[in-house]
């Protein structure tokens, strides 16, 4: 595809393109360093205009039935499917996701989420009787949504679908590093029957547009996915207007491999959950906790399995790890690898040097450390790259203590005899645990404990985030 394919001429406000007035921001292909598009550099005035459009559209949209809104969502999901290849190519160009993954996880998963949310309309308890009270669940109002670059379509669809089903309107700021799918989504939504003003897109930086959304007195809720640092700022700014805030933040997931686990399966799955999307996944498992007596077996299996994770041009369908999303992020990940070596962790795969044959582009070698101190920076801090730390433990209690020792609490995995693994899973202070590679369920809640955020996405739990609850006594 040529760069002209990704031309973005303005914000999407009130169902039409609105030209920016404050210059543009480049969109850089991290594999080549080339500018593939430019988007408007939004301002607080642009946010004001989008909020006004969303506020004006709210009464009529909120007055429609849940069934009508579900029908619109189903058309939206079908529209995303019809433009799957265009979206996949755009995501690969803007943030380096391997094209095979762009076609599946980056596009197919969002379509599945839309369908699952639409399916909630008929059975959800929009009203219920409690004693002499009628309990009514109503849309919260205008929602501000701010999303990151690692899953640019998935992250917004996970907010947009339940917000629209609930009857809300939205002002959306995509990441300035991966904004291309936002315009496609807006077009698909309009074609699906989303009225003008119900879904608005304002491009720009977090410091300007994100700040304005968080502070705006006519925005009733902010839903944010991204770093814990940014989430803290959004929470602080939003508190001035006492708006609701839902935060899905960082993670440092642990994969606990018990003594009675199927070792090859546990290691292979753990590696996949560490290296998928180049490790740029908040729900990744970058810590592999293993019985000390079996660490050598685990290392041997991990070293062999790592050979499958080829690095290179993300448009090549054989490649499993593309570039990091930007050169700045590549430098951050490399800095952590260098820190791990300096702190004495045993490097068994990869390292800080560029992958062979890739002298340019934001590429990082997939890297594995063993004998990692669980209190070290590479075991405690979110690296957000293809870096796996293998941490030995003496007994099950120590494994649980290590798993719970970071400031995060988003996801984890446990492998072992099913009942044994389930018992350990219950002890983990995280929002989601996979036992023996349990399958992803779009109806199950996803969200974090501790500094991984608050609130939940997916299923009825995600829908409830976007509703107010009123009681009417009779």
Image: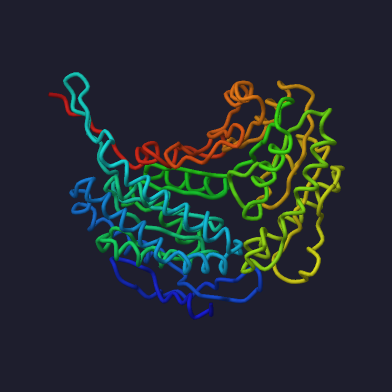
In this picture the colour scheme is rainbow
- Image x and y of residue 174, in percent: 47, 60
Q: Is residue 170 left or right of residue 317?
A: left
Quadrant in which residue 278 is drawn: bottom right
Q: Is residue 265 above or below residue 418?
A: below
- Image x and y of residue 393, in percent: 78, 28
Q: Is residue 149 left or right of residue 314?
A: left
Q: Is residue 236 left or right of residue 414?
A: left
Task: Tell me which residue sits at (50%, 75%) in the image.
Answer: 38
Q: Nearer the viewer, residue 187 or 60?
A: 187
- Image x and y of residue 59, in percent: 19, 52
Q: Is residue 239 left or right of residue 399?
A: left
- Image x and y of residue 425, in percent: 60, 26
Q: How many marks?
A: 0
Residue found at the far top of this picture: 131
Q: Is residue 21 above or below residue 268?
A: below
Q: Nearer the viewer, residue 52 or 94?
A: 94
Task: Tell me which residue sits at (29%, 49%) in the image.
Answer: 168
Q: Quadrant of the C terminus?
A: top left
Task: Tell me which residue sits at (76%, 69%) in the image.
Answer: 358
Q: Is residue 237 above or below residue 298?
A: below
Q: Nearer the viewer, residue 194 or 42?
A: 194
Task: Tell me which residue sits at (66%, 69%) in the image.
Answer: 31
Q: Nearer the viewer, residue 222 or 392?
A: 392
């Amino acid at each position: 595809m040529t760069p002209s394919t990704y031309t973005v001429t303005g914000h999407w406000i009130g169902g039409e393109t609105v030209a920016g007035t404050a210059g543009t921001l480049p969109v850089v292909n991290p594999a080549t360093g080339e500018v593939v598009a430019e988007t408007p550099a939004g301002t607080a005035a642009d946010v004001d205009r989008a909020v006004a459009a969303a506020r004006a559209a709210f009464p009529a949209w909120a007055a429609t039935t849940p069934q009508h809104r579900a029908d619109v969502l189903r058309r939206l999901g079908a529209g995303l499917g019809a433009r799957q290849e265009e979206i996949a190519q755009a995501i690969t160009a803007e943030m380096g996701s391997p094209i095979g993954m762009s076609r599946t996880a980056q596009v197919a998963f969002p379509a599945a989420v839309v369908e699952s949310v639409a399916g909630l309309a008929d059975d959800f308890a929009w009203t219920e009787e409690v004693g002499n009270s009628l309990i009514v669940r109503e849309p919260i109002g205008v929602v501000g949504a701010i999303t990151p670059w690692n899953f640019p379509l998935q992250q917004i669809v996970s907010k947009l679908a339940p917000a629209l089903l609930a009857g809300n309107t939205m002002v959306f700021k995509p990441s300035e590093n991966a904004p291309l799918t936002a315009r496609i989504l807006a077009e698909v939504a309009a074609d699906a029957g989303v009225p003008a003003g119900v879904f608005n897109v304002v491009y720009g930086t977090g410091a300007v547009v994100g700040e304005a959304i968080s502070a705006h007195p006519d925005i009733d809720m902010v839903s944010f996915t991204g770093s814990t640092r940014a989430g803290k700022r959004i929470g602080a700014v939003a508190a001035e207007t006492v708006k609701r805030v839902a935060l899905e933040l960082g993670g440092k997931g642990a994969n606990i491999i018990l003594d009675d686990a199927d070792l090859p399966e546990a290691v292979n799955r753990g590696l996949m959950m560490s290296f998928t999307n180049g490790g740029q996944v908040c729900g990744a498992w970058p810590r592999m906790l293993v019985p000390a007596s079996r660490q050598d077996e685990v290392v041997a299996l991990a070293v062999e399995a790592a050979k499958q994770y080829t690095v290179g041009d993300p448009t090549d369908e054989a490649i499993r790890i593309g570039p990091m999303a930007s050169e700045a992020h590549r430098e951050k990940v490399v800095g952590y690898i260098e820190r791990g070596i300096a702190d004495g962790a045993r490097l068994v795969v990869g390292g800080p040097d560029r992958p062979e044959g890739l002298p340019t582009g934001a590429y990082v070698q997939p890297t594995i450390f063993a004998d990692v101190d669980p209190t070290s920076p590479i075991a405690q801090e979110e690296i957000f790259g293809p870096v796996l730390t293998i941490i030995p433990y003496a007994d099950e209690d120590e494994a649980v203590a290590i798993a719970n020792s970071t400031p995060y609490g988003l996801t984890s995995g446990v492998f072992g005899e099913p009942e044994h693994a389930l018992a350990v899973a219950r002890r983990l202070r995280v929002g989601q645990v996979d036992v023996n590679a349990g399958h992803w369920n779009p109806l199950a809640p996803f969200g974090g404990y501790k500094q991984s955020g608050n609130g939940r996405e997916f299923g009825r739990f995600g829908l409830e985030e976007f509703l107010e609850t009123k009681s009417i006594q009779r």
